[in-house]
Image (tube, grey):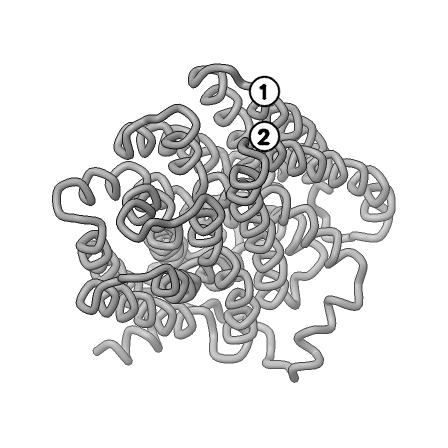
């Protein structure tokens, strides 16, 4: 039966799927399945962040080790996104997603049964969780291939709203760790993951217009275009900022303001929820006014908010700045992926992997640099200020390329 689901899925697409409004223009069960898969994958991808204070106390980790521990899943996810991008174009997004989910569930279950007893063990677990982060390169093309260019921003935004799973981790992981111990949380996570896996098998369906498989050299062909590198750089700031903060904020709130892990989790959830909520709105806004205009405001707001965080004297001020930063970065995530399919529609699978990889690298940099800044300088401020500078550099780059993009891109959608 599982094989049948992998091959067929549930096809409830309307007969007028190529016309009408957004919901009539694609395959909504696949969009829902992509969202659920992405949501639970992101929940476990950042799971080490909310558990970090407890893990650090148990294993006696330094500030730099804590930063590296929560950053490792983002780096592993970045590398694996390229692999998943290749798999999507070779065997299809549905099969690729099924394989990835099985690996994550098996890895978490093994960690729960065997235990994680050293810093090296946390890094090994982080690599396994990277498969969850790499879901980005599967869920987005799974949904995107069903929708025409004029609805790409909304489709990618709704599927990408699965990054709200980071809210679930921040809300529930600290409380569950207090009740049952942090190692047990790893096993408990397998329950919702297993349920969503079955739903995914039943509802997801590969689009019929998938591009023909290419050779490895052809997969990497987009890297010959400067446009690919620009899009990767922009996403390294928007998504890198989002996931880097999602992983690091529990550590920041507990270290900076001496909050309990549960209260720090609530504060983190509020920030992450803001960024997750606006991702589809960012895609829709980019559909309406253009991804370039939207990103210009995003980078400016993110830089200002992160600068504010670096000098925030109290928890309410810091929390307010983080919410603004996450709202901007979440909007930027949707905006970048309104632009990607306009330029690389035929290579959307591999480009999703490449751009997603860049986002993961950005998140790894931010999370690890905050830990290093705290250990070396005694403050998180230098890490925030440097990333604010990167947002301004991205704004400058966007200003340099926007005229060329508008002249050369001919998808018919807003740029």
Left-right relation of 37 to 93? left
Which residue does the numbered mark 2 point to in the structure image?
Answer: 381
Residue 159 in percent (x, y) is at: 45, 50
Residue 337 coordinates in the image, percent (x, y): 60, 49
Q: Nearer the viewer, residue 11 or 351?
A: 351
Asked if residue 170 is positioned above or below residue 37 in the image, the reply reads: above
One can see residue 151 in this view: no
Is mark 1 in CB contact (under 8 Å) with mark 2? yes
> Which residue is the site of mark 1?
311
Q: Is residue 169 above or below residue 411?
A: above
* Residue depicted at x 69% and y 73%: 220
User: Against 370, is 100 above or below?
Assistant: below
The quarter of the displayed image where residue 117 is located: bottom left
| Residue 375 falls left or right of residue 108 | right
Query: Which label belongs to residue 238?
Result: none
The quadrant of the image that shows the C terminus is top right
For the question of whether residue 68 can be seen, the reply is yes
Q: Residue at the location (62% across, 52% down)? A: 149
Mark before the other along the chain sequence, 1 or 2: 1
The residue located at (20%, 63%) in the rendering is 112
């Amino acid at each position: 039966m599982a094989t049948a689901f992998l091959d067929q899925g549930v096809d409830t697409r309307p007969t007028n799927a190529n016309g009408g409004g957004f919901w009539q223009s694609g395959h909504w069960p696949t969009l829902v399945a992509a969202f659920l898969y992405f949501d639970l994958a992101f929940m476990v991808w950042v799971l080490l962040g909310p558990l970090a204070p407890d893990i650090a106390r148990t294993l006696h980790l330094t500030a730099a080790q804590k930063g590296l521990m929560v950053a490792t899943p983002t780096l592993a996810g970045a590398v694996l996104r390229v692999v998943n991008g290749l798999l999507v174009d070779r065997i299809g997004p549905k099969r690729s997603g099924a394989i990835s989910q099985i690996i994550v569930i098996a890895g978490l279950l093994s960690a729960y049964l065997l235990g994680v007893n050293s810093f090296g063990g946390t890094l090994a677990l982080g690599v396994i969780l990277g498969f969850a982060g790499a879901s980005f390169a599967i869920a987005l093309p799974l949904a995107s291939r069903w929708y025409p260019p004029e609805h790409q921003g909304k489709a990618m935004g709704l599927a990408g709203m699965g990054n709200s799973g980071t809210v679930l981790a921040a809300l529930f992981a600290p409380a569950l760790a207090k009740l049952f111990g942090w190692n047990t949380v790893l096993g408990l996570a397998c329950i919702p993951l297993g349920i969503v896996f079955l739903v995914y098998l039943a509802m997801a369906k590969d689009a019929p217009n998938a591009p023909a498989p290419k050779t490895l050299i052809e997969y990497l062909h987009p890297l010959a275009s400067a446009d690919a590198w620009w899009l990767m750089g922009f996403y390294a700031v928007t998504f890198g900022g989002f996931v880097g903060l999602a992983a690091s904020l529990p550590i920041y709130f507990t270290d900076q303001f001496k909050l309990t892990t549960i209260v720090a989790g609530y504060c983190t959830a509020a920030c992450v929820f803001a960024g997750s909520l606006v991702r589809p709105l960012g895609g829709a806004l980019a559909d309406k006014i253009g991804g370039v205009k939207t990103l210009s405001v995003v980078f400016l707001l993110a830089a200002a908010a992160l600068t504010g965080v670096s000098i925030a004297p109290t928890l309410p001020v810091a929390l307010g700045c983080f919410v603004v930063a996450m709202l901007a970065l979440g909007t930027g995530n949707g905006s970048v992926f309104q632009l990607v399919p306009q330029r690389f529609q035929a290579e959307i699978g591999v480009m999703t992997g490449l751009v997603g990889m860049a986002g993961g690298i950005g998140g790894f940099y931010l999370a690890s640099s905050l830990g290093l800044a705290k250990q070396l300088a005694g403050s998180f401020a230098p890490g925030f200020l440097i990333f604010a500078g990167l947002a301004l550099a991205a704004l400058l780059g966007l200003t340099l390329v926007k005229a060329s993009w508008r002249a050369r891109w001919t998808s018919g959608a807003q740029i």
